[in-house]
Image (spheres, helix red, strand yellow):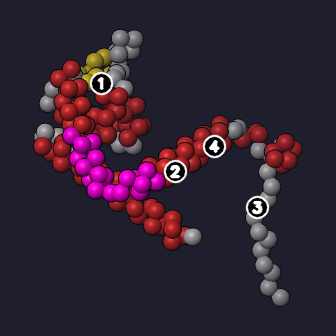
Amino acid sequence: MPDRFEELHRLLRGVTRGVFHLAKDMLHGHGLPPPSMPVMRLIFHAPGITVSELSRETGMAKSYISKTIESLAGAGIVDKRKDPTDHRVLRVHPTAAAMARFHGMHAAVEARLADIIATLPVERVDALIDGLRMLQAALDRAAADATRGAAATPSDAGTPADAATHTNTKKPEATTP
């Protein structure tokens, strides 16, 4: 069974890299560095997002996000605005021209990916989509479970209710004679 998971992991990484390269080529054609892709996606889908939120969502350092925002602002892709209620907070908004450009770039990447997928048998594409939906649902459930688990307080651990709802799944250790 571990071999199947290793293969799935390897395939998911490969597919992710392949899609990234499609988008990277599109960004390069527009003079944008590839790491700006996840930052731009978040800005376009959540106008007014803060640098801290971008950092948290992308997993990139705030200093790198700030440099990326400066680069995107210099290219006329985003506007930086002070938060009206807290002037220490910087909010990032896409420019109107950038929105049109982003949608065009996104459509071009999707069209290229559609051309590639069109080379596959339709029934296999349907099975792939179903499998990815199932995987996404399982990942969403795991994330929700982890969030619920993280929300439990340390004082909840070890209570009689806790003991009644959890069983010991650890196998007993073998003893040597």
Q: Residue 145, labelled with which disc?
A: 4
Circles 2 and 4 in contact, beta carbons < 8 Å? no
Front disc: 2 or 1: 2
> Looking at the figure, which quarter contains the C terminus?
bottom right
Report the Cα–Cα distance between label 1 and label 3: 48 Å
Residue 20 seen in this snapshot: no
Question: Which residue: 28% across, 34% down?
Answer: 40
- Alpha-carbon distance for marks 1 and 4? 32 Å
State which tag comes first along the sequence, 3 or 2: 2
117 inside magenta stretch: yes
- Tag 4: residue type? Asp
* Amino acid at circle 1: Val
Q: Which residue lies furthest to the bottom in this view?
A: 177
The residue where tag 3 is placed is 169
Identified at 40% across, 62% down, the residue is: 11
Task: Please rate how many residues cluster around mark 3, counting C-alpha atoms within 10 Å: few if below 14, some from 14 to 19, many from 20.
Answer: few
